Image (spheres, rainbow, N blue to C red):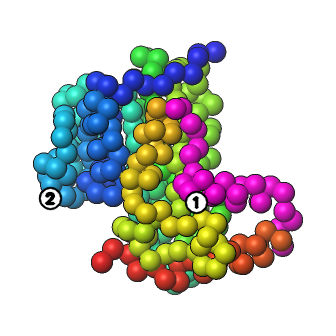
Amino acid sequence: MARKQMVQLRDSHAVVTGGARGIGLATARRLLAYGARVSLWDRDPAALEGAARELPGTVHSEACDITDHDALRSALAGSEAALGPVDVLVNNAGHLAPGTLVDQDPEIWMTTLEVNVNALVYLTALVLPSMYRRGTGHVVNISSAAGAIGVPGLAVYSASKWAVWGFSEAVRAEARDHGVMVSSIHPSYIATGMFAGARLTGPGRLIVPQLRSHDVVAEAIVEGALRRGRTRPMRPRSVRLAVLFRGVLPDPWFNWLMRVLGVWDSMGSWHGPR
């Protein structure tokens, strides 16, 4: 069995999807501070250009739609030609479309699943063979607290993030003998960005407070997963209570607790970026 080994970030090549803003941009900033070379991928060329100008260090950018498999392969080839084989993959790009299931167009469901699951799986499969050959690498997948608790108004999003967690666990077991690590990150609501306005109410707001910035999640990615080898950092750490309560409480009690903590009403104040 291969010994668990952390990727040395200095001079490593990290690909960050959805890298032009939010969690992706904050993660790139932290990676560059450790001397990594970073490929930013995003579907917004103008935002990519602005991010590349803002960031210090070695940055390569690729504008691509990650739901297009040909575009993914082209972006990977371009990044590797510029900065070498990929040592770190941060599957951060995500799609959010709040709304009750029956009120949403099926096209919205499909986009959510294409971005949050299919593209993540496909890109991971693209980078792993090279990592296996070299006996090193780390894949970090962004799941969610909604990947541990089903949230009304986020049914398909929750499903996609549960899939990311399960996928990460399974591939971690496959990759361990090849010297490659796989982590999943599980953040709760962030005060800014696409989840702006969403929050738990009542006692839940005290137990699982809003994250103050995207950098809190970037810290979990870089310091928790990449530098310490943690497999499922949760932010805030109290998100882990959901996993504990689900394991020990009967379903009716667990559902009652989620209601009391405000989980079921947490998207009621959502407004998104303004």
Q: Write down the quadrant of residue 245 in the picture.
A: bottom right
Left or right of 218 in this view: 265: right
Q: Amino acid at mark 2?
A: Ala
Quadrant showing the N terminus: top right
The residue under the point 47% across, 62% down is 211
Camera sees residue 52:
yes
User: How many neighbours does mark 1 have within 10 angstroms: few (below 14), some (14-19), or many (20 or more)?
Assistant: many
Position of 49 relative to 76 (above/below): below
Numbered label attached to residue 145: 1
User: Vertical placement of 185 versus 212: above or below?
Assistant: above
Q: Quadrant of the C terminus?
A: bottom left
Residue 108 pos. (x, y %): 43, 71
Query: Does 234 appear in magenta?
Result: yes
Identify which amino acid the numbered label 1 is placed on: Ala
**Residue drawn at point x = 44 percent, y = 77 percent:** 197
Q: Nearer the viewer, residue 248 or 91?
A: 248
Q: Which residue is at 50% across, 38% downward? A: 225
- Span shown in magenta: 228-252
Q: For residue 212, which quarter of the picture?
A: bottom left
Residue labelled with disc 2: 46
